[in-house]
Image (cartoon, coloured by chain):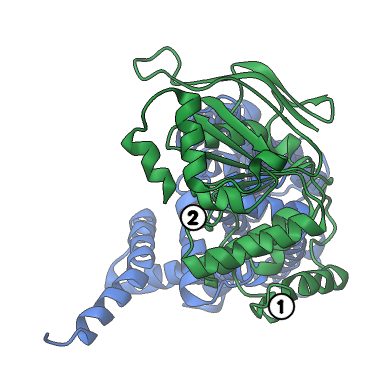
Chain colours: A green, B blue
């Protein structure tokens, strides 16, 4: 189980630009849960994700994964527990390295790396098998440089890389936002397939309300650094985008700003 | 160019091939512009020359020189990783500090090795003249280091180091301690440069505190030159290109200095180097833009 307790994050502390990115966030994610996170720009979605990955550290509060405190642990030291797919397809892979080298790198997550050769026949066969399921023909291009692939192909490989090794939680950071609709649908389907298959605990940030309701088992909405609502199970079934907006309005007790209307797209 | 000058160029090309390996690790693999090299090259020379004149085994002296070079690289990396000093500035700080340290190690501006036991001494007794045995011995040393370096770059740790330079954020997300990789890479890089300095002193017969001036430019010229003349698609090719680049560079310099009609003298070496490096950096880009000019048509 993943637990966040009273997490507070401030950006540019002590300057005129000081902003509270997260104002005392409490959240429990059960094992096997697939949580989608929605919210407008600056709501704190990315910060929440970065708190889990270690790229942002909390000013106060605690983060536990299976009762192990990770609050102050650096990104690389917690990588064995946390897997991540970035929004930018270029960010999640190394373009100078070949496809097989990228995958070999991902195989080392959560393991001690040694001086033994990073690639061998056994690993290559495993990568081929994994790449075949993508149906992109990448299994025959193991030695090609990552930079030769399209954004969608790279994002699909990023997803494979994040799920090659076990993790306590998988973080998806608007990972289909930079792709064209067809490729985005393909990557999303692939994500659901892999998550289901490995029963991964997942947190997915998205800016599409439609997507937030269509995938996953639980949806949370953030606004101004707080979780404004959290729906799961029966309450979530049959919920549609207008219901979500109405719910948001009710909880917020204020009329919708232009910014939050943008979310309905 | 006569045979001795030619073999002399090959010999120093081999030595500067090691410098090029080091520069490739810092500039290309880690994306860390490292000028420590100008200090770690004479550091290697100073340490090994001082040890050799004190009666130590030349191989042991060369090994200790490598350790000293690794230490210099570690300091630069530490200044950058832990104290957050800009990489270029961190390396300049180490470089100028090393000038004093090298003087302290030698106790005077230079140490002569004439008549001392060097790694080359055992090979001088044979029938072959020194100008043939020296490049031969150095080829063997450089080849061994080349194979070890390539194997390292293909290892799990080597792969992590390459990812650290190429995409540090992604590297950390996959559990790579990027700070530690920079420390390790810089240590290896400067150890290689110190070995080069040590071998250079042993073949030239002296270590001098000023011998490091411009070494970084020669190293960089070799890396860029190598990339200009051959494909560097794989790590093996990239490392071989460094060596080829270094040898070609030394041959180019020897040719330039030997052409009487150019009227160049050895004091023009640094000027020639600067011009060659500029050309090597500019030409690949210029070729592209010129092609553009000629194929654009008149629309």
Left or right position of B204 against A195: left
- Specify the label residue A139 is tagged with: 1
Is A225 situated above or below B23? above
Query: Would residue B246 be seen by someone viewing this image from the given angle?
Result: no
Which chain hosts label 2?
A
Task: Please identify the quarter of the rendering in which residue B113 is found.
Answer: top right
Between B250 and B76, the one nearer to me in the picture: B76
Residue at horizontal 64 percent and vertical 53 percent from the top: A215
Q: Which residue is mark 2?
A: A177
Q: Secondary structure at mark 2?
A: loop
Residue B68 in the image: state x and y as whole percent: 70, 36
Left or right position of A116 against A233: right
Label tally: 2
Residue at the far top in the pictured view: A14
Which chain hosts label 1?
A
Q: Which one is in front in this view, the residue at disc 1 or the one at disc 2?
A: 2
- On-image quarter of the C terminus of chain B: bottom left
Q: Pointers 1 and 2 in contact (CB under 8 A)?
A: no
Spatial separation of the CA atoms under disc 1 and disc 2 = 25 Å
> Does mark 2 fall on the same chain as mark 1?
yes
For disc 1, the neighbor class at 10 Å (few under 14, some 14 to 19, many from 20) is: many
Residue at horizontal 51 percent and vertical 33 percent from the top: A247
Between B117 and B70, the one nearer to me in the picture: B70
* Disc on the earlier residue, 1 or 2: 1
Residue B9 in the image: state x and y as whole percent: 54, 68
Task: Please identify the quarter of the rendering in which residue B253 is found.
Answer: bottom left
Is A226 situated above or below B247? above
Q: Secondary structure at mark 1?
A: helix
């Amino acid at each position: 189980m993943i637990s966040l307790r009273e997490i507070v994050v401030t950006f540019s502390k002590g300057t005129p630009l000081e902003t509270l990115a997260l104002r005392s966030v409490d959240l429990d994610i059960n094992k096997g849960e697939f949580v989608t996170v929605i919210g407008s720009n600056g709501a704190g979605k990315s910060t929440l994700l970065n708190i889990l990955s270690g790229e942002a550290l909390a000013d106060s509060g605690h983060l536990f994964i299976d009762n192990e405190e990770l609050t102050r642990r650096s990104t690389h030291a917690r990588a064995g527990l946390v897997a991540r797919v970035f929004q930018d397809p270029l960010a999640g892979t190394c373009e100078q390295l070949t496809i097989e080298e990228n995958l070999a790198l991902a195989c080392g997550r959560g393991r001690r790396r040694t001086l033994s050769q990073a690639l061998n026949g056994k690993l290559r066969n495993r990568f081929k098998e994994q790449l075949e399921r993508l149906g992109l023909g990448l299994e025959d291009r193991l030695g090609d440089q990552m930079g030769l692939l399209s954004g969608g192909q790279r994002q699909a490989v990023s997803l494979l890389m994040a799920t090659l090794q076990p993790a306590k939680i998988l973080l998806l950071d608007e990972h289909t936002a930079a792709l064209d609709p067809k490729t985005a649908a393909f990557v999303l389907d692939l994500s659901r397939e892999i998550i289901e298959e490995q029963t991964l605990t997942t947190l997915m940030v998205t800016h599409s309300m439609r997507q937030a309701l269509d995938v996953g088992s639980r949806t949370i909405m953030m606004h101004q650094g707080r979780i404004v609502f959290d729906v799961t199970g029966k309450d979530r079934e049959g919920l549609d985008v207008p219901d979500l907006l109405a719910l948001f309005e009710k909880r917020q007790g204020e009329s919708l700003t232009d910014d939050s209307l943008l979310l309905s797209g | 160019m006569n045979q001795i000058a030619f073999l002399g160029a090959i010999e120093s090309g081999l030595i500067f091939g090691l410098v090029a390996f080091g520069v490739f690790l810092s500039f290309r693999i880690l994306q860390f512009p490292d000028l420590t090299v100008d200090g770690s090259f004479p550091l290697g020379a100073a340490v090994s020359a001082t040890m050799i004149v004190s009666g130590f085994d030349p191989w042991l002296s060369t090994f200790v020189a490598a350790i000293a070079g690794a230490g210099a690289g570690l300091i630069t990396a530490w200044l950058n990783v832990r104290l957050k000093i800009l990489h270029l500035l961190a390396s300049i700080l180490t470089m100028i500090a090393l000038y004093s340290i090298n003087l302290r190690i030698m106790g005077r501006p230079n140490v002569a090795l004439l008549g001392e036991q060097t790694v080359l001494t055992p090979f001088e007794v044979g029938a072959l003249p020194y100008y043939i045995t020296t490049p031969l011995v150095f080829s063997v040393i450089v080849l061994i280091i080349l194979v070890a370096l390539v194997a390292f770059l293909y290892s799990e740790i080597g792969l992590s180091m390459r990812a650290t330079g190429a995409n540090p954020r992604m590297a950390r997300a996959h559990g790579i301690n990027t700070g530690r990789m920079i420390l390790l890479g810089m240590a290896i890089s400067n150890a290689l440069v110190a070995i080069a300095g040590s071998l250079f002193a042993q073949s030239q017969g002296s270590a001098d505190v000023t011998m490091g001036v411009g070494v970084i430019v020669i190293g960089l010229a070799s890396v860029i030159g190598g990339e200009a003349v051959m494909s560097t698609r794989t790590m093996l090719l990239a490392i071989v290109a460094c060596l080829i680049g270094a040898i070609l560079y030394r041959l180019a310099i020897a040719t330039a200095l030997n052409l009487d009609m150019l009227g160049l003298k050895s004091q023009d070496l640094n000027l020639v180097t600067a011009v060659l490096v500029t050309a090597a950096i500019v030409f690949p880009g210029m070729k592209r833009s010129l092609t553009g000019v000629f194929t654009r048509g008149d629309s």
